[in-house]
Image (cartoon, helix red, strand yellow):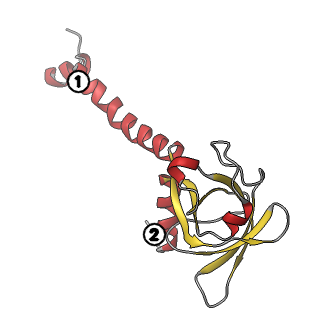
Amino acid sequence: MKNSLRSQAVENIIHNRSGFILQWSFSVFFLIPFLLLFTMWFMKFPMLIATKTELEVLSNNNYKMRISRSGPLQYHSGDKIKLTFDVYPFERYGFIEGRLENIYPLLLSHDLIVEISIPKEFTSNNNVKFSRAACLNSKMHVLKESNFLSLFLNYIQSQKISF
């Protein structure tokens, strides 16, 4: 054996490879949180924005409605939304896709006035043509798709939690 400054026990530790389980446990330990964050960012689910609200006509494809600003959801112009109407059950007829155009906060209230546009004139995702008059006189539900990670970050920001 060569002249060494280390003891025999230290030399054995340096020259012997660690076991298979120990090597892969470090990889798995870092891989699982990364996959979890990746999934939380790309997996979207619908969140209920408003229930039992009504549309007001602004122009041919633009409408106005009042929604409550509750929970960690944040609204931005251009966000996609889905509208379902009480007169057309979602399970049978589907939903209408729309887009938030302008958002106006109401003073002294937690409500917002939002303008939405509906590109296809009241045609659902199942290609069912809804009656515009029936939809305007009906109560509706508004859904926005969001991912868990952005909801969590918005919640932390709204609660003023710092790390």
Q: Which residue is mark 2?
A: 162
Task: Residue type at mark 1: give it.
Answer: Ile
Q: Is 52 located above or below residue 38 in the figure? A: below
Whole-percent x and y of residue 10?
A: 19, 25
Q: Residues within 10 Å of mark 2 (few under 14, many from 20)?
A: few
> Does residue 76 appear left or right of residue 73 in this picture?
right
Q: Are marks 2 and 1 in contact (CB under 8 Å)?
A: no
Residue 21's label in the rendered image is: 1
- Residue at horizontal 25%, vertical 17%? 17
Mark 2 / mark 1, whichever is N-terminal: 1
Which of 99/157 is in front?
A: 99
Q: CA distance from mark 2 to mark 1?
A: 37 Å
Q: Is residue 100 visible?
A: no
Whole-percent x and y of residue 63?
A: 76, 68
Furthest residue to the right?
Answer: 59
Q: Secondary structure at mark 2?
A: loop
- Residue at horizontal 50%, vertical 49%? 91
Q: Quadrant of residue 35?
A: top left
- Residue at horizontal 55%, vertical 66%? 49
